[in-house]
Amino acid sequence: MPTSHAYVLTVPVDEGGEFVFAHAFDSGIRVWMRGLTCRVDERPRRLCGVAAPLHGGTIRDMAPLLDFVADFVEHAIDDPAVQLTPGLIRDTRPVVVRTGSDSLSSRMHFSYRAMSPLHTDGPWDGAAAELLFSRVRGLKYRHMGFFATGLPELPAGAAPDALPAAVINRERAEYLAEYLQAPAGQVLHHLGHAARR
């Protein structure tokens, strides 16, 4: 059953396209992509089955997303109104492996927050949605990198309620809020290990 999304945030991506996030203080934050243009050329190319293209890029200002996620975490209802479906990755490598973010050399310079796979809301077909955010360790930047795969496309002018969505559930929204709020000098080390979960 469609849920009325009282709060919608559109986040532009530097390389082209945008993310759309929505919530109504219910079961979670719904996520779609719209026209993402930067596709990652994966090497080695071992994609098979229902593997989805991998998109990457930069969110120039993460402050609006931080406020949006923190607002959801603070006010979300304790009794979820919608039953979410756990995501299931089929016949493809997890996003942390596809991006190489699980390597020691990468973790020395970046801190990651991975959501792999995301829960879903509505009929779902294809590879599970995954999101991975990255921040440079020890530097005070407003921007944040991302990798995304399997997210549903939200056409321009389409109402979010009309389409299936990937969902960041309440627990993962709390982890994401903590990651986004982490002081620039730390980019919490223990959260850097969360990508393995």
Image (spheres, rainbow, N blue to C red):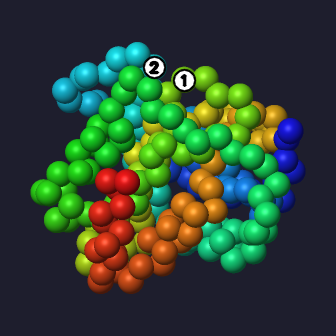
Q: Quadrant of the N terminus?
A: top right
**Residue 11 placement, left or right of 91:** right
1 or 2: tag closer to the N-terminus = 2
Residue 87, by quadrant, is top right
Mark number displayed over residue 126: 1
Q: Circle 1 sits in a helix, a strand or a loop, which is it? A: loop
Q: Residues within 10 Å of mark 1 (few under 14, many from 20)?
A: some
To which residue does mark 2 refer? Answer: 50
* Residue located at (63% from left, 48% from top): 167
**Residue 71 placement, left or right of 115:** right
**Residue 169 placement, left or right of 118:** right
CB-based contact (under 8 Å), mark 1 and mark 2 = yes
Q: Is residue 192 visible?
A: yes
Q: Position of residue 124 (x, y in %)?
A: 65, 28
Q: Circle 2 sits in a helix, a strand or a loop, which is it? A: loop
Q: CA distance from mark 1 to mark 2?
A: 6 Å
